[in-house]
Image (cartoon, helix red, strand yellow):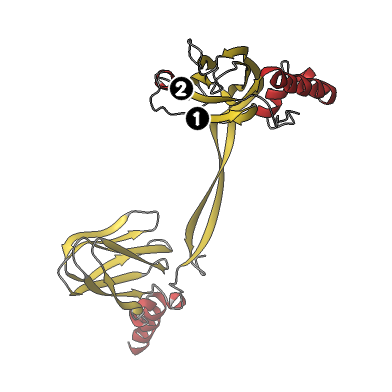
Amino acid sequence: MKEIQQIILIVVVFLVPGIFFAQSPLEVVDRSFKLEKRESEVFYYGFAEGDRIDFSFEVIKGKKLSEVEVFEYDGPVRYSEFDVKKTGGKIFSIQKTGIIGFKFSNSKGERIISFTIYRTPASKSKSNFDTEVLWETKIDTTYVESFENYLVSRDTIIHNITDQVATVNSSLNLNGNKTTFNFQLPSNVISWSYYIGVNQDGKRVFEEATQKLATNAGPILNRLPGYGPLAALALGGTSYLARIQSGDDVSFYIVEGNNVNLFLTGQQFRYYKKGKVINDFSKMLSPLNGMMHFCLINDNTIRGVEVVVKVTAISVNEKWGQRVVNKRKITKSKIPFLLNEN
């Protein structure tokens, strides 16, 4: 009989080792932390297949937490509770080695929370399982189809807007000593320029500049019809225009809108450009649209003057198209892993 009892004991020991060699709970974490209002904190730990998890927490300063949640990473929620101050002995079993998240959410005032987690391994071989969760940066590159506008063509056009000679009477003339005329800037103007020259000397300076430009700017003349001293000036090139040092002069203003009427009636008015000159020329970057006016006045009491006025504008017409492009999108994400996951 005694021999039979010994045989049974040996069989039980070998077939049911968990009865005699049950694993003790192992501490995973015992910590406290602070949560401010509208803050959440998540802690991640790894567990081995067959582990039993014992989770407890308590709010040691402050009232209840809005929510406590235990969930599998990229998996289902294992436990969730709202408006809770303390819980203990929440037991979870791990069916597959993986990562568990413990989330604490606070919607009100400051809270200090303490929590503990213990794991009971399924076997002695799992006792040294490393529960630390490590993170690696994963970079994903994808291509997103989108539409992109692109420039099909860009045409530069020269508009010789005004080329005229205006007579401005002397200040004692019964018909008055003021003359005005208008000009319209075309659409898509990027710059424009003007030239004013008094009497024959003023005309001569422009003619000489035109001849010099024709001699020295042949390729540009072929590429841009209408290219002359004022076009060169408006485009930032060499215009060959020169200023006259002596001769009869005229006062001029460049205005817009009702300012021309204020000029004619002797009232205060606004202007973009003014001068008292024998001749003058300049590049203009504003305004770039609308109806403009030249206002001329001669303060010579005896002699009237003839004033040549020229205006050239540069416009750029762009044609745009649309095409499909694949734009690269790079996404960075943090991926958790365990050292002994396998």
Three-letter amino acid code of the residue under disc 2 = Glu
Of 156 and 158, nearer the camera is: 158
Q: Is residue 270 above or below residue 9?
A: above
Which x, y percent locates residue 64?
16, 66
Of 19 and 242, nearer the camera is: 242
Residue at disc 1, secondary structure: loop
Which x, y percent locates residue 214?
81, 20
Residue with the most extreme top position: 175
Instruction: Name the residue tied to disc 1.
Output: 272
Which x, y percent locates residue 244?
70, 29
Tell me if 24 is positioned left or right of 240 in this view. Answer: left
Q: Earlier in the sequence, mark 1 or mark 2?
A: 2
Instruction: Name the residue tied to disc 2.
Output: 256
Is residue 147 something one can see in this rendering? no
Q: Is residue 264 above or below residue 237?
A: above
Tell me if 13 is positioned left or right of 146 in this view. Answer: left
Q: Is residue 17 above or below residue 194?
A: below
Q: Quadrant of residue 243?
A: top right
- Is mark 1 in CB contact (under 8 Å) with mark 2? yes
Three-letter amino acid code of the residue under disc 1 = Tyr
